């Protein structure tokens, strides 16, 4: 028959093993949530990427002399698709958002364009996509927060270090996007 001390040691060892398994599985779930959230951001960025050429072509028909804006939007679109790391994508996203604002500012000077059904539909789709991107960013950052808390807090930090789980980077907004919006009524 086993002594109470031996039984106690076995119970403690089993509890520690169960904790490590649960903690490891939690980190796997968090990693998968982050990867999924990033994939959702990518899906929406691709959707926006696909909408932009149609939008540019629609505006070009009305604003033929606005070549600088079209070139900037196209360059920003290219930079967005060639970005591979999170900081590169965040920077390219900010650049693309800024150039799209310029494109819509140009469109405001053309009342017939504003009334064009195709333009209105594209603008509405792009607006919806921007909302989905914002939601996907929030989901991504929420998942990163949970992961980073687990990686930093004891005893999860022990498991994270043992199995190589690391802190992940938040999807941050560029300083340009944080600037106050200037509205002019003329």
Image (tube, grey):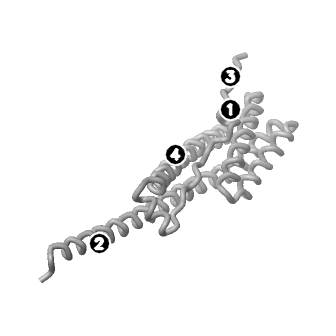
On residue 138, the disc is 4
Q: x, y (%) of residue 117?
A: 65, 38
Q: Are marks 1 and 4 in contact (CB under 8 Å)?
A: no
Q: Residue at x 54, y 56 (%)?
A: 167
- Mark nearer the N terminus (2 vs 3): 2
Q: Nearer the viewer, residue 180 or 166?
A: 166
Q: Secondary structure at mark 2?
A: helix
User: Can you tell which quarter of the image residue 86 is in?
Assistant: bottom right
- Mark nearer the N terminus (1 vs 4): 1
On residue 115, the disc is 1
Neighbor class of circle 4 (other Cα within 10 Å; few <14, some 14-19, many 20+) is some
- Which mark is in front, 1 or 3? 3
- Which mark is in front, 1 or 4? 4
Quadrant including the C terminus = top right
- Residue on which the image places disc 2: 13
Q: Disc 2 and disc 4: Cα gap in Å?
A: 39 Å
User: In the drawing, does residue 104 fall left or right of residue 147?
Assistant: right
User: In the drawing, does residue 144 fall left or right of residue 97?
Assistant: left
- Residue on which the image places disc 3: 183
- Mark nearer the N terminus (1 vs 3): 1
Q: x, y (%) of residue 140?
A: 52, 51
Q: Residue at x 88, y 37 (%)?
A: 65
Quadrant including the N terminus = bottom left
Neighbor class of circle 3 (other Cα within 10 Å; few <14, some 14-19, many 20+) is few
Q: x, y (%) of residue 182?
A: 69, 24
Vertical order, 59 against 80 (above or below): above
Q: Secondary structure at mark 3?
A: loop
Q: Disc 2 and disc 3: Cα gap in Å?
A: 65 Å
Q: Disc 1 and disc 3: Cα gap in Å?
A: 21 Å
């Amino acid at each position: 028959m086993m002594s109470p001390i031996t039984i106690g040691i076995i119970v403690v060892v089993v509890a520690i093993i169960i904790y490590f398994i649960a903690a490891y599985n939690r980190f796997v779930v968090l990693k998968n949530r982050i990867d999924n959230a990033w994939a959702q951001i990518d899906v929406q960025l691709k959707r926006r990427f696909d909408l932009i050429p149609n939008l540019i072509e629609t505006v070009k028909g009305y604003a033929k002399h606005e070549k600088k804006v079209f070139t900037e939007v196209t360059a920003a679109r290219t930079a967005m698709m060639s970005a591979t790391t999170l900081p590169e994508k965040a920077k390219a996203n900010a650049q693309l958002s800024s150039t799209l604002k310029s494109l819509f500012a140009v469109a405001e000077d053309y009342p017939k364009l504003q009334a064009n059904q195709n333009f209105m539909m594209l603008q509405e789709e792009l607006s919806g996509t921007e909302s989905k991107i914002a939601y996907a960013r929030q989901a991504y950052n929420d998942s990163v927060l949970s992961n980073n808390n687990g990686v930093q807090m004891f005893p999860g930090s022990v498991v994270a270090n043992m199995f190589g789980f690391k802190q992940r980077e938040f999807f941050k907004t560029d300083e340009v996007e944080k600037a106050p919006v200037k509205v002019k009524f003329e």
